[in-house]
Image (tube, rainbow, N blue to C red):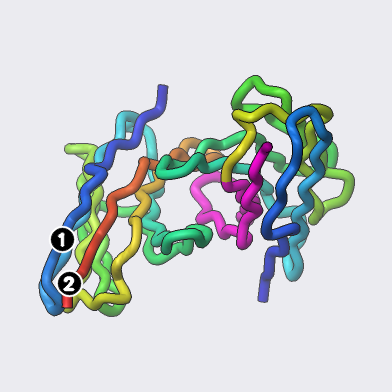
Amino acid sequence: QKEVEQNSGPLSVPEGAIASLNCTYSDRGSQSFFWYRQYSGKSPELIMFIYSNGDKEDGRFTAQLNKASQYVSLLIRDSQPSDSATYLCAVEYGNKLVFGAGTILRVKS
Amino acid sequence: SQTIHQWPATLVQPVGSPLSLECTVEGTSNPNLYWYRQAAGRGLQLLFYSVGIGQISSEVPQNLSASRPQDRQFILSSKKLLLSDSGFYLCAWSVGGNGQPQHFGDGTRLSIL
């Protein structure tokens, strides 16, 4: 059973703060990791992907991967109220993705 | 650029009625195609995926079926809907091969009465 675990939240942060979202996965063989943002009532939108250990930065977003610990995280700097959404972690298993249940992020202005 | 179309956006159906949801992708060839269901407040459950015309893999036994009659067309069907089939149905595509990001359509919200 391939598992992807996320804290359901909600995670509440003040506007301008750093939001840290975490995800663990069960299969050491996974090579590709994805973060999606899903606004209420909408479909998921890809925001970041990472394949190698370490950090990958894209604007206010940084994805961090530690394959030895089977851990991937997403940092959102200078959080804005528009970042309030559910963030889904997805892990590759061949040509499929397994999604976590998501973490609800609330950014308070 | 690639686009994915999914319709209808909303559907209300009685128990026992048939279902057909369609998804098409433009701007790419031989994509991998996926159908997911998301129950209210829950994660994404992979229902079916396809790596080519006529090739369907089923992930969860249920009363749903999928077909891929053309390269960029993916159809989700049921002969008789159950109350438990309610949910948000999402179609997604990716470039062929392992470890590729998936891109989602706008989804169909299905309510069974």
The residue at the point 20 percent across, 64 percent down is A75
Q: Are marks 1 and 2 in contact (CB under 8 Å)?
A: yes
Residue A24, quarter of picture: top left
Indicate yes or no whether the magenta region holds residue B10.
no
Q: Earlier in the sequence, mark 1 or mark 2?
A: 1
Q: Amino acid at mark 2?
A: Lys
Q: Who is closer to the viewer here, B13 or A25?
A: B13
Q: Tell me the distance, in whole angstroms, between the alpha carbons under discs 1 and 2.
A: 7 Å
Q: Looking at this rendering, what residue extends furthest in the front direction?
A: B113
> Where are the magenta residues, as a range?
B88-113
The residue at the point 45 percent across, 63 percent down is A46
Label 1 residue SS? strand
With A2 as the anchor, is B23 left or right in this view?
A: right
Residue A59, image x, y percentages:
29, 79
Q: Residue at label 1? A: A12
Label 2 residue SS? strand
